[in-house]
Amino acid sequence: MQERVDITHSQTQAAIDAMEAYFAARARGAPRAERERLERHWLSAARRLRISSAS
């Protein structure tokens, strides 16, 4: 059980880090391609978190 908690915690942290990177890029006016790449990374991290939480 502790292993599952550790995995979920690390996935949550990865999703938060990706979200922060995306919003930081928006705030500094990063090029569209970079923002889109960061957005995809953020959304895939959130999907992984949602999938692991559902099972």
Image (cartoon, helix red, strand yellow):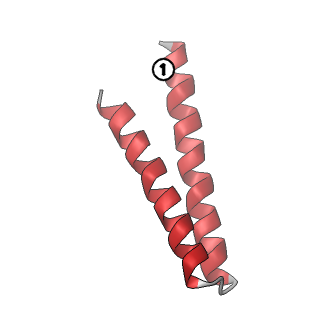
Q: How many marks?
A: 1
At 56% from the left and 78% from the top, the residue drawn is 33
Nearer to me, 55 or 33: 33
| Residue appearing at x 30%, y 26% in the figure | 55
Image coordinates of residue 39 in percent, x first then y, are: 50, 66
Q: Position of residue 1 (x, y in %)?
A: 47, 12
The residue most toward the right is 28
**Disc 1 residue type (three-letter):** Arg
Near-viewer residue (54 or 29) = 29
Quadrant of residue 28 within the rendered picture: bottom right
- Other residues around mark 1 within 10 Å, as few (<14) / some (14–19) / many (≥20): few
Element on which disc 1 rests: helix
Q: Residue at x 38, y 32 (%)?
A: 52
**Residue 1 sits above or below residue 26 on the image:** above
* Residue carrying label 1: 4
As drawn, the residue found furthest toward the front would be 33
* Residue at 52 percent of width and 57 percent of height: 41
Give the residue furthest to the left. 54
* Outermost residue toward the top in this view: 1
Q: Position of residue 16 (x, y in %)?
A: 57, 53
> In the picture shown, does residue 17 fall above or below 6?
below
Residue 17 at x, y percent in the picture: 63, 54
